[in-house]
Amino acid sequence: ARPLRNEMDAAPGLLLAEARRAAAAAENEGVLTKRICDQRTLQHWKLSASHAALMQFANDLAEAVVGRAVSDTCEERPVIGALLAEFDAMAAWIDEIPPIQQAMRYGNKAFKAWHARMAERAPALMAELLEQRAAPESGAPAAPADAAAELAAYFAEAFGSPTRIDYGTGHELQLLAWLRGLELMQVLDPADRPAVVLRVFERYLALMRRLQTTYCLEPAGSHGVWGLDDYQHLVFVFGAAQLVGHARIQPSSIHDEELLAEAGGGYLYLAA
């Protein structure tokens, strides 16, 4: 399995020397740091092998659900059940941590407590998931010693910012990176991809919608009329893939209230 960190090997001249040295020093010390800090480092990452691999992973997930409804059967290995159970437990925390009374319309501060509980749980969860990977004797290489910490960092960023009390597509991208990391570490398998979208991602969406409405999470980086959704993006990628070749549902079907009521629960695009 290849390292999970973003490669810093493409497009010389696009990354500041100071940022390169700081990142190298942090990596040598085993400290996880953000490597995309501004437009320059963003452009560098977009030309890197890790960006291409992540975009390919998103495409592979979409291909895995072409023509498939959420209700369709798919293989669900025990690790899929473990992920679903974790998301269900996290949803239950919302009932245990109700929103507080405050004057502000957006950003209920109770979200900070929910997020702190999730972040505290993340390292142990990653360790548990890594225990479910293929055994070394089966030919799988041993997981890097810091794999759990790195996976936990992506996971903890996937549910919004406890500082700004907001959520957006950048956080959703962290979930994609986390799922990609689980596959790289052989916790997930390419054969799991239909279940990753139709079960795990669908459950993640349900959790995030509860968090958004309960704690009034502000949209992070809203694009207004230029964005399909203030919070999500992948739901439209995967949702469109589900509807490829569908005999009845067309793009204009989003205006058909009867059809939405009938089929909305089976297709991510219609439920968005």
Image: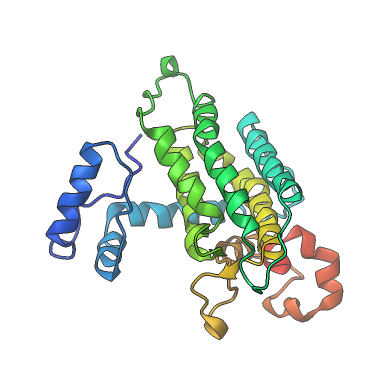
Residue at the image position 22 percent from the left and 52 percent from the top:
8
Residue at the image position 29 percent from the left and 60 percent from the top:
45
Q: Nearer the viewer, residue 225 or 26?
A: 26
State the quadrant of the C terminus.
Answer: bottom right
State the quadrant of the N terminus.
Answer: top left
Q: Nearer the viewer, residue 202 or 122?
A: 122
Give the colouring mode of the picture.
rainbow
Quadrant hosting residue 238: bottom right
Residue 30 seen: yes
Can you name the residue that lies furthest to the bottom here?
A: 225
Q: Return the x and y of residue 163 as percentages of the image width and height.
A: 49, 60
Q: Nearer the viewer, residue 208 or 7?
A: 208
Can you name the residue that lies furthest to the top here?
A: 137
Residue at the image position 51 percent from the left and 70 percent from the top:
220
89 left or right of 177?
right
Residue at the image position 27 percent from the left and 62 percent from the top:
47
138 left or right of 33?
right
Q: Return the x and y of residue 34 as percentages of the image width and height.
A: 33, 53
Q: Return the x and y of residue 32 as percentages of the image width and height.
A: 33, 44
Q: Nearer the viewer, residue 197 or 24?
A: 24
- In the depicted structure, whether residue 182 falls above or below residue 43: above
- In the depicted structure, whether residue 209 falls above or below residue 88: below
Q: Return the x and y of residue 115 as percentages of the image width and height.
A: 58, 50
Residue 246 seen: no
- In the depicted structure, whether residue 31 falls above or below residue 249: above
The total number of labels drawn is: 0
Quadrant hosting residue 28: top left
